[in-house]
Amino acid sequence: MIDDKTFNAVLGLCRFSISGTEQEHFKNQIGDIISYVEKLKEIDTSHIDPDLGKTITVNDLRDDAPGESLIRTKLEELSPHFENGFFRVPQIIEEMEEKK
Amino acid sequence: MKYDVIIGCEVHVQLSTKSKAFCTCRNVFGGEPNSRVCPVCLGLPGSLPVPNKEHIRSAIKAGRALGCSIAPLTKFDRKNYMYPDLPKAYQISQYDMPICNNGMLTVFTQEGTRDIRILRIHMEEDTGKNIHADDGSHESYVDYNRSGTPLLEIVSEPDMRSPAEAAAFVMSIHEIMQYLEISDCNMEEGSLRCDANINLWVYEEEKKYATPIVEIKNMNSFKAIQAALEYEVQRQADEWQNHRLTREAAGKSTRGWNEASGKTILQRTKEEEADYRYFPEPDLKPLSISADLIQSIEKTIGELPKEKRERFMHQLGLSETDTIVLTTEKAFADYFEQILTHYPNPKKTANWLLGEVKKYLNAGNISISDFRTTPAHIAELLLLQESGKISGKMAKDVFIKMAATGKAAQEIVSAEGLSQISDRGELEKIVIEVIAANPGSADDYRNGKLQAIKFLMGQVMKASKGKANPQEAEKLLSEKLSS
């Protein structure tokens, strides 16, 4: 299960706000997901080397060569809120009133 | 009130690679909004990032220049947070296995020198840019051109003990990055940005109290860094006296420097590290860095500012003041040394560069890389002056014409018939004529009024249309007057 404090913290981080009646519904759903994933804890991993480099491939890199970017009309198709070359989004207020 | 100031810095350096960190969009400043974006840097579903070799090479180069050890195995991680300028809602960064660790940088201030430990340098990507609409619509515009620009974040230990030291630290990082030629380091365009963490250790009745740590953002110049931190020291000292809040009680907050008001202003409460939910980037494989790669990159590091300064002072015999001005910008130091390959007189060259050339560049706000006159042209000019073909005054005039037209010194001297008359025979003729035309002054001189030679010299210069070599002419004049 997930407690109210953690649930509200997660909502805050996701910038979600949900109504009171939905609260319980989603809390239960998230609780189900967490307990499902918690099954992983039952696996004994003590004999597995945590060093990433030994068992998997590394260094999938590319040369520093520029290529094509998307054209304006494509961007307009992609976003319903594209205006004068910019994406429009809800405003985030950065500065807050100083708490005294 | 007795206290110590504790400052740590995080410096973000935008790398001047040709393409972005994880996609092939071009990496340049500005331009039409959203003209350099693709599915990867817009974070569209299904797109996959591929790291840029040059990002990794630059990180290793910076790390080695700052005395860091390079991790043989490193990886990228996701730093999650919601903000419109971050289209994927996470930033590709590095968390627990950064590419560079444990370096050191010594800074110099009027208070003395201090070794600042570098905790780490990691690779990450830059965000887009928000522009707040001022039409009352409560909406913002986002430009993702900057999204995915390769960054290095250089994190110091909290080893600085004054705002001046913090400014000197950032200045030194700026200089080194510029010498490494991995960033244009243009602070006005945000190519080098600094955040600082600052708090005070207050000593009262044999106890030490730490005030809450504040992260200061939006300091866009060395001057701003010092001013913001000085303001913050005072503000935290006042806060302590009024509220006695400790770091344990109040945690951490973020404040933005407001240049216009000269104050720091409280911003959103900073997320705790756990809130970023870091986890290994599943779309990118770890990086294994060989000793051979590190060695080959070390060879490209070249001379760093400190070494160059020592060489300029000890081998070239330049003063400390001249050396500092010559070496602050690598391109300027390179220009100076290129002149020396044609004209090996460091002191005279330094005087010219720091005098006439600097004056010209500053007046026109021209950078040395945009300057039309080549080092070889300056060398030629200095040689013409030294050989006596032109006078010091002429050299200055010729220089202004060279700078304006990009022409060579000899070309201007020939075209304008500027060469100085040093030939004894030619000068003698002029001197004899001047003495004959001004018998009164000549007599005055002969009767002991030595000042009269000044007037006669003026006449010589006039008769030669300013071309007479003044030293030679004056010598001849006194010879003729005394004979």
Image (cartoon, rainbow, N blue to C red):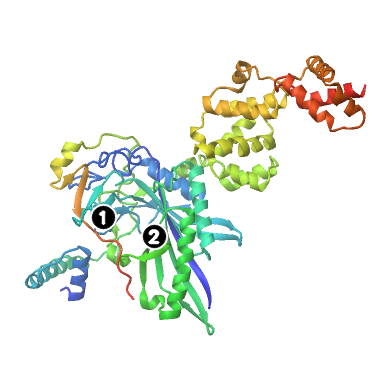
Residue of label 2: B258
Residue of label 1: B90
Q: Position of residue B184 (x, y in %)?
A: 44, 42
Local secondary structure at mark 1: strand
Sequence-wise, which precedes: disc 2 or disc 1?
A: 1
| Rendered image: mark on residue B449 | none
Q: Position of residue B271 (x, y in %)?
A: 30, 66
- In front here: B326 or B11? B326
Distance of label 2 from label 1 (alpha carbons): 28 Å
Q: Is residue A24 left or right of residue B412?
A: left
Q: Is residue B267 left or right of residue B310?
A: left
Which residue sits at x=41%, y=64%?
Answer: B263
Which residue sits at x=30%, y=69%?
Answer: A97
- Asked where in the image residue A29 lies, by quadrant, the reply is bottom left
Q: Position of residue B368 (x, y in %)?
A: 52, 36
In this view, the residue farthest toward the front is B440
- Name the amino acid type tagged 2: Asn
Q: Is residue A54 above or below residue A30?
A: above
Q: Would you call the spot at circle 2 few (<14 residues within 10 Å), some (14-19), or many (20 or more)?
A: some
Report whether mark 2 lies on the same chain as mark 1.
Answer: yes
Local secondary structure at mark 2: strand
In this view, the residue farthest toward the bottom is B205
- Name the amino acid type tagged 1: Tyr
